[in-house]
Image (tube, helix red, strand yellow):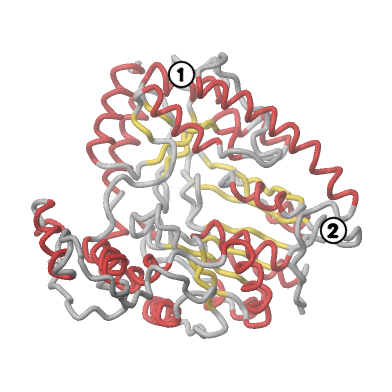
């Protein structure tokens, strides 16, 4: 149904039939606006001009506003609750597997040290050093031998990823979802979920195609569609303040899907914490079949579901087999293993898209880092309770604690059903009530000492930018308990009613 696409370089020599003139003209203006906005924002971050709000930060391709806020947090010494990355280590066994891969370079080292099952059993850096030395007895000693030792794991892997890792991913889905996926033709290991989504968009999309995105959204979705000269179209999720839930209008969704090529879906959802229900996904998948739309899912928070939604993440191609041939599932270990710097992800895809997807992936990034691929084997062999219990509870107390402090100072906060963000209405905070979202975020990072992200960063439609976006700030509760405690103290000291 979706034939293979050839891969063209983004250059002036690209054929006119592949890069239509209107694709350039519609995107160039937006890119110029984005460049101007980023120049102003970067100047603010570098202290070369007064901080000013980026105008429509989703309107082109530029530096992530979320990562900009991290730089501002560092500059002003604020607690960084802006960017959604943990500051706690991955499981010890997974870290040791990575070290073993880098140090030995071979997949089956002769020395395989016993690793404590609980990170708390390791009470010092010396303990870890001893384990590393047991893997490589000559570690630290200058070698006098000129003989070259065999090394596999610090070199290229096959572009689609190690076969044993693809098999482990397949077994992971079988164990958790009773879903069978072919490791040979149905899985590609990627450079994180970000690249997984980008390669999926380039596989199925053409310049001028429309990609439907739920707003509020993660900023990478509209940016990536525009990198490939596609056009994002937004369907607005709206908050029910009393119920503390988020929902979409079915008629609005169908109107957007009519004539579209792709639906980008993130569940559990960043930034709202919404977990899409079975009924909602049934509506969504039926409409995608009706309008011949391809589904690309981003499922990096799949194990972080809470309350009534705990353990209820729905794998679309398993639950709705009628769309399995039009669904690409993107995931990574970045958030679930607290290893966002490893850039290790994957995409599940229908076999008829595999050749093209792997061609795009190969030409964009070649491969995911080989040592991380090997370490991911250990991650996928963690006890099932790590996925069902540890990740389902790790951030609950932090979310509750942060939400309590935010409410005390006037924020309106709905409890998230998943992920680890709080998307809060801030107009009830006396010190922030008269400020726009950018100015409120700047006040938070400079005067309060807590970094967050302005709501305008998560919306793209004109009507939402004028209304919903003006109400919200986003906080990430994935930092350490110590950081959350410090942020709560700063919030209540600076903003108490």
Residue 424 % position (x, y): 46, 34
The picture places residue 89, in percent across and down from the top left corner, at 27, 52
Residue tagged by mark 2? 14
In this figure, which residue is indicated by the disc labeled 1?
A: 443
- Which comes sooner in the sequence, label 1 or label 2? 2
Residue at screen point 62% across, 64% down: 296
Q: Which of 275 and 308 is in front in this view?
A: 275
* Front tag of 1 and 2: 2
Q: Horizontal placement of 31 versus 306: left or right?
A: right
Residue at 47 percent across and 71 percent down: it is 156
The residue lying toward the viewer, choosing from 420 and 230, is: 230
Label 2: which secondary element: loop
Residue 245, compared with residue 353, is above or below; it is above
Residue at figure coordinates x 38%, y 75% from the top left: 152
Query: What is the quadrant of the N terminus in the image?
Result: bottom right
Quadrant containing the C terminus is: top left
Task: Determine which of the numbered discs, if any, sits on residue 288 in the image.
Answer: none
Is residue 83 shown above or below 317? above
Give the side of residue 228 with respect to residue 473, left or right. right
The residue lying at 78 percent from left, 67 percent from top is 291
């Amino acid at each position: 149904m979706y034939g293979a696409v050839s891969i063209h370089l983004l250059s002036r020599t690209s054929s006119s039939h592949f890069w239509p003139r209107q694709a350039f003209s519609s995107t160039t203006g937006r890119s110029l606006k984005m460049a101007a906005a980023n120049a102003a924002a970067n100047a603010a971050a570098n202290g070369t001009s007064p901080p000013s709000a980026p105008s429509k930060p989703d309107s082109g391709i530029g530096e992530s506003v979320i990562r900009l806020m991290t730089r501002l947090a560092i500059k002003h010494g604020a607690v960084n609750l802006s960017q959604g990355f943990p500051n706690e280590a991955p499981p010890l066994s997974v870290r040791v597997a990575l070290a073993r891969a880098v140090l030995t370079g071979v997949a089956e080292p002769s020395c395989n040290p016993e690793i404590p099952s609980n990170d708390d059993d390791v009470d010092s850096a010396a303990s870890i050093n001893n384990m590393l030395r047991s893997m490589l007895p000559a570690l630290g000693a200058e070698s006098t031998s000129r003989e070259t030792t065999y090394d596999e794991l610090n070199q290229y892997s096959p572009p689609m990823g190690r076969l044993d890792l693809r098999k482990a991913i397949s077994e992971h889905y079988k164990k958790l979802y009773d879903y069978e996926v072919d490791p040979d033709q149905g899985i590609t290991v990627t450079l994180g979920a970000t690249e997984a989504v980008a390669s999926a968009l380039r596989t199925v999309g053409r310049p001028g195609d429309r990609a439907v995105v739920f707003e509020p959204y993660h900023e990478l979705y509209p940016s990536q569609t525009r990198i490939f000269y596609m056009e994002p179209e937004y369907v607005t999720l709206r908050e029910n303040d009393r119920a503390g839930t988020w929902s979409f209008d079915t008629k609005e969704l169908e109107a957007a899907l009519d004539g579209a090529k792709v639906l980008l879906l993130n569940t559990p959802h960043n930034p709202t914490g919404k977990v899409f229900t079975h009924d909602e996904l049934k509506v969504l998948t039926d409409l995608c079949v009706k309008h011949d739309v391809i589904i690309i899912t981003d499922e990096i928070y799949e194990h972080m579901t809470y309350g009534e939604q705990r353990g209820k993440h729905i794998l679309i191609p398993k639950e709705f087999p009628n769309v399995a041939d039009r669904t690409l599932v993107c995931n990574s270990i970045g958030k679930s293993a607290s290893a966002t710097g490893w850039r290790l992800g994957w995409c599940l895809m229908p076999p008829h898209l595999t050749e093209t997807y792997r061609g795009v992936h190969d030409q964009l990034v070649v491969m995911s880092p080989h040592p991380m691929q090997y370490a991911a084997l250990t991650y996928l062999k963690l006890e099932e309770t790590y996925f069902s219990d540890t990740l389902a509870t790790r951030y609950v107390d932090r979310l509750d604690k942060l939400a309590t402090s935010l409410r005390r100072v006037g924020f309106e906060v709905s409890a998230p059903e998943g992920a680890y963000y709080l998307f809060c209405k801030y107009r009830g905070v006396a010190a922030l009530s008269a400020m726009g979202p950018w100015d409120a975020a700047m006040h938070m990072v400079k005067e309060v000492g807590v970094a967050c992200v302005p709501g305008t960063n998560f919306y793209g439609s004109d009507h939402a930018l004028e209304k919903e976006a003006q109400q919200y700030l986003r906080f990430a509760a994935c930092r350490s308990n110590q950081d959350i405690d410090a942020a709560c103290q700063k919030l209540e000291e600076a903003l108490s009613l």
